[in-house]
Image: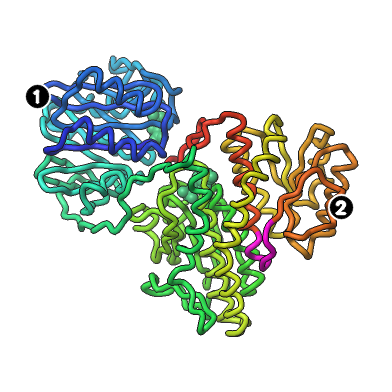
Amino acid sequence: MCGIFGYTGKRVVVETVLQGLKRLEYRGYDSAGIAGLHGDQLLFCKQVGKIDTLQERVQSEGMVLDLAIAHTRWATHGKPSDVNAHPHFDASGKLALVHNGIIENEAELKQELKKKGIAFTTDTDTEVIAKLIGWFYEGDLLRALKTALPLLKGAFALAMIHEEHPGKLIAVARQSPLLIGVGKGETFLSSDANAFASYTREVIPLSEGEVAILTASSIQIFNASLEMIEKERHELDMEIAAPTKGSFAHYTLKEIFEQPQAARNALLSHCDEEQGVAIFPEFRVMPLDAEFIQRLLIIACGTSFHAGLIASYSIEEMARIPVTVEIASEFRYKQPLILPGTLVVAISQSGETADTLAAVRLVKAQGFKVIGLCNVQGSTLAREADETIFLKAGPEVGVCSTKAFTSQLTVLTLLSLFLARYREMSREEGQRFIKELYQLPNQIQRILDQSDEIERIAKKYAHLSEVFFIGRNLMYPAALEAALKLKEISYINANAYPGGELKHGPLALISPESLLVALTAHEPTFDKIQSNIQEVKARGAAVLAICYEGEKRLEARVEDQLFIPRTRGVLTPILTTVALQLFAYYIAKERGASIDQPRNLAKSVSVE
Ligand code: AGP
Ligand code: GLU
């Protein structure tokens, strides 16, 4: 899920492009590169490592360009290295190209090109694209693209320049995001509109194999058959301030501490206290008349999938509507049976997760409408969903999702209330529920105020190589999310199990060196989770219990406890997760991990 940025115009090109690229670093950061034209010369600089390292080198070399493309990489084909960093070139060295996506038939194409005497210098699929276009190039770049592009299998976004086409940026997008920023006497290209939003709000998203030829003063767009077309321009209404860490050591910590505000933003304009209902003024039409919604299908990946799992408990409990939650990368390869009366909800913080987008397209192709839950305006999900609820959590830079998760759960709880009030829930019950929802930001703050205690406990366990999490009912998906946080940012092998499943196998892994984190704040199953704690204690393991404030029943039985405010059951996963986000953060900090940009990961998984 690399990041692509391009620019042509009156600004200092190298500086503008590298600043834009920095805004895309969340998409991948194992290597970076820039290529541009200066007069009739194609110049480039690329290397393993982060964009700052590239910037230092480019500045020291005093690179000056008339236009440029740049790339920050998350490797899929070929390890992170100087030679595998983008840009990649055709055989003549006159075409430079950067790429986001995967070419699924790169091996066959590479074989064919080698038979024609084309030599390769990298292990990437991207180089195959450049060499293929170069093979067909005889002076007309559009014609070469018309021949080469249909041979490529897979989803991709490309930006390229050619020595024989000065002043031109060429862009191609097939199921990977690429947006044109339309300025006055300047044109931008980016994987994410946020990266140029401070220069222009006028955006043209490319899609479905479209090709664009951009100059500082002109934009030509062609459809997949390379016939010239007109495309609608969108006006971006989005935050343009480049996020900063402020006084926090990491974006991740800052975003954990922004969660009271994220919850407030999610509640804002979504509650009618008088009627005791949730409202969604952003809906042009409810994709399905709420009275006729017979079931929900939630589709997502990673943390967003965990939010969907938790929501399935609250929707079924409150609205008595069956909910199916699917991992997008699995769902899209099933022959899904979606029954009439199904409301589909796609959850994606970035709005660019390739598997979630593919699942949305599959569902829409079957005639179903989709509600998108998303945190990025102008994202592909926001464009393709029939209705979108924006989380308004503010840009989430840390690769591990925190405030977006809290915001997702808050909005999904509101959706539960919305549906429940169409069924059995009375107005008075709805009014009471909203009052409890309004407590959420302050309750989150009370957990954040315990950060020193959480850090103290985290340091005790930071040396471990594996940690077990258990929960029951909706605390099981909360345990999945807590384990994912710890995995992602500390690299500890953390896994979560339904409490009742321990004795069906995982208990074999428990030893006196183990730590079990028990998510106990679910009254109906407390006695059962307490028994699970006993099973583990009997094998000598240590236990950290996350409990409601005032819980005394575990005092003498566990090594450590963290306390969360008592609240309605469906809101407890949010509070438990905030405590365990901090637990994961302080362990990762103690271990000196790269918390904001963990190894091998990226913030937006826009490849399959
Ligand atoms: C969450 O901490 C991870 N970074 C990852 O699992 C993430 O939730 C997943 O890639 C889905 O991202 P999305 O919400 O942007 O679709
Ligand atoms: N497949 C390309 C590479 O490995 C791009 C990867 C991506 O978009 O993440 O360099």
Residue appearing at x 73%, y 59% in the figure: 548
Mark number, residue 531:
2
Foreground: disc 1 or disc 2: 2
Mark number, residue 506:
none
Residue 4 at x, y percent in the picture: 31, 37
Give the position of the N terminus as an image quadrant: top left
Residue 145 at x, y percent in the picture: 22, 35
Kindly tell me whether residue 418 is visible in this rendering.
yes
> Is residue 373 in the magenta section?
no
Disc 1 crowd rating (10 Å Cα; few below 14, some 14-19, many 20+) is: few
Residue appearing at x 30%, y 29% in the figure: 129
Q: From this viewpoint, which residue is outermost toward the right? A: 538
Which is more toward the observer, 377 or 586? 586
Q: Is residue 407 above or below residue 42?
A: below
Q: The disc labelled 1 sits on which kind of residue?
A: Gly
> Is residue 565 in the magenta section?
yes
Residue appearing at x 18%, y 47% in the figure: 222
Residue appearing at x 51%, y 47% in the figure: 401
Magenta residues, as a range?
Answer: 564-572
The local secondary structure at tag 2 comes to helix
How far apart are the two marked residues, 1 and 2, measured between alpha carbons? 74 Å
